[in-house]
Amino acid sequence: MPQDSPARYGMTIGLKDDMVDEYLRLHASVWPDVDAMIGECNIRNMSIFIHELPDGHHYLFMYLEYIGDDFDADMQKMAADPMTQKWWKETEPCQQPLPNRKAGELWAQMKEVVHHW
């Protein structure tokens, strides 16, 4: 794998069953300023997937590639952005954080097990 390849992140979170339609509606047209901030924070190739388990509960999986030098600083920059804060006020009520996530995490970061290049 090339040395200059991006850092890959996988994250997961629950989705409140009664908020699935709202979450999908919001993400059908992400606000342009929010989308731009994601890019300004050195995130590329980001995707969010949804899955319903047999028990009827929904979960989201996010994959992203980070091309910057300081992930924590870029995430702080994103969190400080007023438009992103407004977006999160719309999306966070839809989400159900996992009980075993680390302190300070909304989306639980996952450990990469395998990567096929």
Image: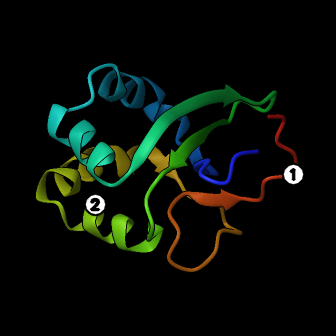
Q: Residues within 10 Å of mark 1 (few under 14, many from 20)?
A: few
* Label located before the other in sequence (2 or 1): 2
- Quarter occupied by the N terminus: top right
- Residue 27 at what x, y percent from top left? 35, 27
- Secondary structure beneath dot 2 equals helix
Per the image, the residue denoted by label 2 is: 78
Residue 100: which quarter of the image? bottom right
Q: Is residue 67 above or below residue 78?
A: above
Camera-side residue of 62 and 8: 8
Residue sitting at 70 percent across and 46 percent down? 2
- Residue 80 at what x, y percent from top left? 20, 68
Residue 87 visible: yes
Camera-side residue of 68 and 103: 68
* Left or right: residue 84 compared with residue 96: left
Are the two marked residues, 2 and 1, in contact with CB atoms closer than 8 angstroms?
no
Q: Amino acid at mark 1?
A: Val
Q: Is residue 13 above or below residue 73?
A: above
- Quarter occupied by the C terminus: top right
The disc at residue 113 is: 1
Inter-mark Cα distance, 2 to 1: 27 Å
- Secondary structure beneath dot 1 equals loop
Residue 12 visible: no
Residue sitting at 55 percent across and 34 percent down? 17
The disc at residue 62 is: none
- Residue 84 at what x, y percent from top left? 22, 52
Q: Residues within 10 Å of mark 2 (few under 14, many from 20)?
A: some
- Residue 21 at what x, y percent from top left? 42, 23
Residue sitting at 29 percent across and 51 percent down? 88
Q: Amino acid at mark 2?
A: Met
